[in-house]
Amino acid sequence: MKQIVTDTNLLEPNELQEIEINLLLEGLYQLYGYDFRGYVRGSIGRRILNRMKAERLPTITALLEKVLHEPGVLERLLNDFSIRMTEMYRDPPFFVAFRNEVVPLLRELPEIRIWHAGCATGEEVYSMAILMQEEGLYGKTRIYATDMNEKALMAAQKGAFPLKKMQQYTKNYLKAGGKMAFSEYYNTDHQFAYFSPSLNENLTFAQHNLVSDSSFNEFHVILCRNVMIYFDNTLQQQVHSLFYDSLADGGFIGLGSKESILGMPKGIKYAEFNSSEKIYRKKADV
């Protein structure tokens, strides 16, 4: 009889499980093209162990077998791997700095292209859409919001967020320098807040994998906040190269509070625009 793992305190893989994790990640890449081999092993290892327990399986190898043969298990595991820790106007001082320091320079452009990479369920995308609308720039702005998780993107496109979260989102909005009554941007029912369809007019949601997909446009702003903390150093350098190649000269990149541009590949040149809020500006290629 197979032993079922039920110890909910089992959070770190042992030596044998590390080998199994390597095989699982290699299998995902070889068969499906999903490459998680460069993710920080501690974080992704815990997610694999949690999925193993949720499926009531005795080993990671048993999970691998199901992932290779049962699409439903694969979908659930990929959903586990997707990072969705987000909220509207997360880190309000970042948005204050963006509004006061970056926006005046964006005004000079005939059109503005912004890329939210790893947008999850879209909270920060709608935050930026509202900010650009309040600054009178949304009409010439196109915001591209991408994530590897199709389910998260479908949720983002709806522009509907749990009503119970709106009190915190309103506080964040005000701290971020919001200029209106936040409630003017959405309607509600007993469960959700539905943001105005006008905010969707210049939004483009698309599936994109930072690990394996290439650049698809040139952008004036790239925002990828608190995503790369889950990548190992090699993968971080790879993604930084992708962003740098996708950014126009003089364009801006915004990172998360725990992220840095230190240790990037040679040839990548940014000026510290607002170092406290992790906003950097690409130097012109002379």
Image (cartoon, rainbow, N blue to C red):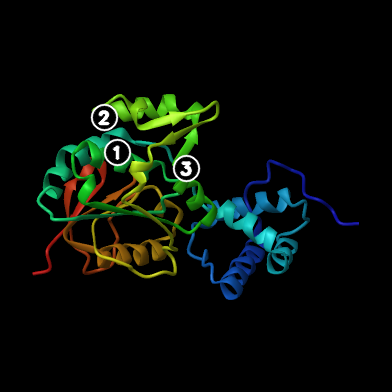
Which residue carries the number 1 mark? Answer: 130
* Residue placed most toward the observer, 75 or 253: 75
Crowding at mark 1 (Cα within 10 Å: few <14, some 14-19, many 20+): many
Which callout, 3 or 1, points at the residue further toward the start of the chain?
3
Taking the view exactly as shown, the residue that stands out farthest to the right is 1
The residue carrying mark 2 is: 178
In the figure, is residue 187 to the left or right of 202?
A: right
Regarding residue 257, the answer to whether it shows in the image is no
Give the number of the mark in front: 3 or 2: 2
Residue found at the very far bottom of the displayed protein: 30
Residue 164 versus residue 154: which sits nearer the camera? 154
Answer yes or no: is residue 67 visible. Answer: yes
Question: Helix or strand or loop: what does disc 1 sit on?
Answer: helix
* Side (left or right) of 54 relative to 211: right
Q: Position of residue 193 (x, y in %)?
A: 46, 32
For badge 3, the amino acid type reads: Met
Q: Residues within 10 Å of mark 3 (few under 14, many from 20)?
A: few
The residue depicted at 66 percent of the width and 56 percent of the height is: 14
Q: In the rendered image, which residue does mark 3 sit on?
A: 85
Proximity of marks 2 and 1: CB atoms separated by less than 8 Å = yes
Q: CA distance from mark 3 to mark 1?
A: 20 Å
Q: Is residue 193 above or below residue 142?
A: above
Q: Amino acid at mark 2?
A: Gly
Residue drawn at 34 percent across, 43 percent down: 199
Looking at the rendering, in which quadrant would you find the N terminus?
Answer: bottom right
Q: Regarding mark 2 in the picture, which secondary structure is present there? A: loop
Residue 34 found in image quarter = bottom right
Mark 2 or mark 1: which comes first in sequence?
1
Check disc 1 and give the amino acid type. Answer: Ile
